[in-house]
Image (cartoon, rainbow, N blue to C red):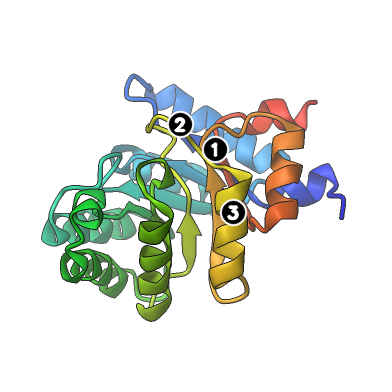
Amino acid sequence: MDFTKKEIAKTIDHTYLRPEGKAEAITKICNEAKEFGFAAVAIGPYYVPLAARELEGSGIELSAAIGFPLGYTTPKTKAFEAREALENGATEIDMVSNITAVKSGIWTEVEKDIRAVSEVCGESILKVILETCYLEEKEKKELIQLCLEIKGVDFLKTSTGFGPAGATLEDIRLFRKLAGGRLGIKASGGIRTLEDCKAMLQAGATRIGTSSGVKIMQT
C-alpha cells in the first residue's frame, strides 16, 4: 500500500524537543502544523501554554513529553507533570516508561508508573514510550503486554529520539503483531525522509514522530 503526502501528514506528530528552543520556534512549528495538516505538535511541558494558544481552534492535537527523556522519575512526579500539562492545554501525553525498572525486572513498579499517568489522562490520549534501543525482545514483549492490560493506554511508541537508536521496522512489526488493532503504534526516532515514513506506515505504524515533518512534506 502506498501513502499520499496528505495521508502521511495526518499521521505526523510535529516534534520539537530541543533544550535550546526559543518561544519563536514553538510558534513556528505550530504554524507549520496548521499549514501542512499534521496530526499533532509534540513538545516539552514548559511551552504547552504557548502552543495551546497558537493551536486553539485548529483541530491539531498538542502532546506533552512526560518523564522525558530517561523515564526514571517517580510515578507521582510523572502524574503531576502530566496533570499540569493537561491543565495547561495539552490534549495528548507521551510518557517515557520506567526503563530502569524494566531492565531490573521490577514489573510491579513499571505497572504502577504507567497506571499513575493513565489515571490522570482520563479520556486524553496516552502514548507509552518503550525506548526499544535499550530493551531485549523479551522485555519489549512483556512491556507491550502490560500496556495492553492497563486501561487508558492508547499508543505504543518506540523511542524518545534521544537514545542511541530510534525506530526500526522490526520493532514496528513486533508492535503490530502483539498489539495491532488494539493500540496505536507510533514510530519515533530517526525518521527523516518520505520513504522512512512510508516504510514505517507499511510496517504497521499509525503515527510518526519526527522533527523533519516540513522537510518530508516538501520532498
Quarter of the image where the N terminus is located: bottom right
Residue position marked by numbered label 3 in the rendering? 172
Q: Judging from the image, what secondary structure is the residue with disc 1 in?
A: helix
Residue 74: percent from the left, percent from the top? Answer: 12, 55
Q: Does the CB distance between marks 1 and 2 fall below 8 Å?
A: yes
Residue position marked by numbered label 1 in the rendering? 30
**In front of the other: 20 or 186:** 186
Task: Tally the marks.
Answer: 3
Quarter of the image where the C terminus is located: top right
Rounded to the nearest angstrom, the CA distance separating label 3 from label 2 is 29 Å
Residue 26's label in the rendered image is 2
Residue 158: percent from the left, percent from the top? Answer: 48, 49
**In front of the other: 158 or 135:** 135
Residue 69: percent from the left, percent from the top? Answer: 30, 39
Q: Residue at x 47, y 51 (%)?
A: 62
Left or right: 80 as drawn, with respect to 184: left
**Sequence-earlier tag: 3 or 2:** 2
